[in-house]
Amino acid sequence: MAELSERDGVRMAVIGCGHGVLNSIYASITKAAQLKDWPGVDLVIIGGDFQAMRNATDLNVMSCPVKYREIGDFHEYYSGARTAPYLTIYVGGNHEASNYHFELYYGGWVAPNIYYMGAANVLRLGPLRIAGMSGIWKGHDYRKPHYERLPFTDGDVKSFYHVREMDVRKLLQVRTQVDICLSHDWPQGVEWGGNHSLLFRKKNHFEEEAKAGVLGSTAAKYVLERLRPPHWFSAHMHVKYAAIVNHQDSEPEKESEAAEETTGRASNGALPSRNEDEIDLGLDEDAEPEAAPPKNEDEIDLDMDEDETPVIQPTAEEQVKAVVAEAIKNSNAAKGKKRGRPRKSSVSAVPSDLRAQLPASFTKAPSEPPPKRLPFPETITNKTTRFLALDKLLKDRDFLQVLSVPPMSGSKEPISRPLKLEYDPEWLAITRVFAKTEHIPFGDPNANVPRDKGEAVYRPLIEAEEKWVQENLVDAADATLVVPENFTILAPVYDASKGYKVPEHPREYANPQTATFCEMLGIKNDFEITDKEALARQKAGPRSEASFRGGRGGRPRANTRGGRGSRGGGRGSRGGGRGGAADSGGGRGRGRGRGRGRGRGGD
């Protein structure tokens, strides 16, 4: 039975990294709600590293050293042994059951009452619009397609969760106000809007990167500057941090290909270098330096193999200049040995993965004119974003925040509880446009990503699809935008008698939720696969890494914080620590790096 309450906002609990401990998370939320005299919460938001492990084979495609893998307790919710007491949504991080997330690219229920938002999404909950983007920033994969498909190579396990430009491009087409945005990685530069001095004392390796402009996600920054939500929640850094971002003083950048090199500035665009009017949201600690907390021997350090010295990698331009200089040097040496016309040195000597990271000014001008941009939408009116990052669930750590969020629209209508997740009409229209006009095959490492055509081209297409959505999904008889509760158990449930360390990798499943969503929108389902095909793929094993055009990964760009082996280490050319194992590096070079870069939970 629906419960009507006065307008007091949507009651929610926000969690940092999940790390597969749902039982403790829900128990903590229940206690926090009681302290506020709430009967419960309308929504739980988890900022990634959720770890939806259905069984032991799912663990084998989570980016995490084998000795630190744990099955967690999500499988109890997947099997039906437990039911989530509160509606829960989450975005993906860099320690996930990537194979399960692959099935639900557009979003879907991973268990009853627990919804994964997909690679990118906008949903509605009561009066609120909630946007989300999964993954973390890695410049060398940003402009690539989603080339990963089961059975995963070691490189696929690492690259699956890297944010892709096409997903961000869709978010940058949104022209109406959202209330909340979620990301695992912090938007680049957001640290300057809060008590950064205290942050740098807690995480002293952040300061150098922040001053160089390479801390956080460039892609998330672009989405923040476009959507301007009143609230933005993140995780990943394993620290609680609040900040304010003011938008009125700058025009958001329109460039959707946000793989450009950072310039080393501490601030850019709407993100302030220092907010003198800093607001203490009641979320900050005092300003006195804190002693480092005692070592928790039960804490799993996913940043293992790292030394204490942060390393700032050279920018792509610097790497390119070095490569070109080397080519010129070799050319001159050859000229001295042999008469004749010297070989022409050019940027063609630069690996394709490095060229993909260069700003447009460094690359050859396209034959067609640049995409035409539209003015910033007048329907996005918010001027201030309150950013909050939270820690992971451990003793004496700030991993939980409960709050009531009113809608940006200022609606006075009472809330009818329990609230149900609903599809967002504008997002459905955007999804239809990109599925039809910018289609990219999934699982193909050689697929080409269509060039950004610009808002001026996409906007009329989206407006036409908005009419289609209105006619077919809103106004039609028996139409509803409520997300169907159509969760289905596909993969085997966890068998505790066999333990969680098994040799086999998971097979692929065609999730009926994805099929239903694609059918609803009338778009191609790239994730359809028969049992026979899935078993054949599993039997054949991972494809050769040599099948990747131009190689995989390559040397890291500057803004690639978080990777193991950011300078040498084992089999890898400078920056490649153990070859493809660290996606800040690539291939199996012969260099012998010493030491390892500072990370924050893997890459």
Image: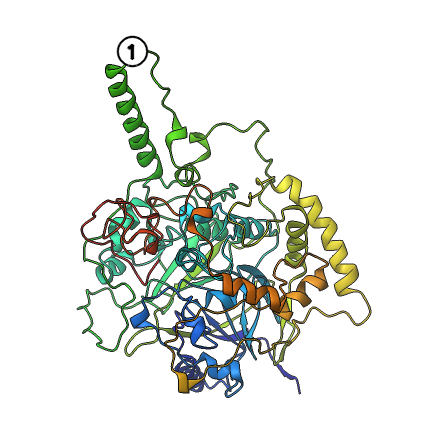
Q: Is residue 171 left or right of residue 308?
A: right
Residue 454, placed above or below residue 224: above
Q: Nearer the viewer, residue 199 or 193?
A: 199
Residue 510: x, y in percent? 61, 67
Residue flagged by tag 1: what amino acid is it?
Arg
Q: Nearer the viewer, residue 353 or 138?
A: 353
The residue sitting at the right extreme is 477
Give me the residue at 71% from left, 63% from top.
519
SS for callout 1: loop
The residue to which callout 1 is attached is 339
**Colour approach in the figure:** rainbow
Give me the residue at 76% from left, 59% from top.
470
Q: Nearer the viewer, residue 210 or 90?
A: 90
Q: Residues within 10 Å of mark 1 (few under 14, many from 20)?
A: few
Residue 64, placed above or below residue 342: below
Location of residue 598 by image quarter: bottom left
Residue 37: x, y in percent? 46, 86
Question: In this view of the protein, can residue 411 be seen by the observer?
Answer: no
Location of residue 408 by image quarter: bottom right
Number of labelled discs? 1
Residue 281, placed above or below residue 1: above
Q: Is residue 143 left or right of residue 376?
A: left
Image quadrant in which the C terminus is located? bottom left
Image quadrant in which the N terminus is located? bottom right
Residue 43: x, y in percent? 52, 75
Q: Is residue 135 left or right of residue 442?
A: left
Question: In this view of the protein, can residue 99 be seen by the observer?
Answer: yes
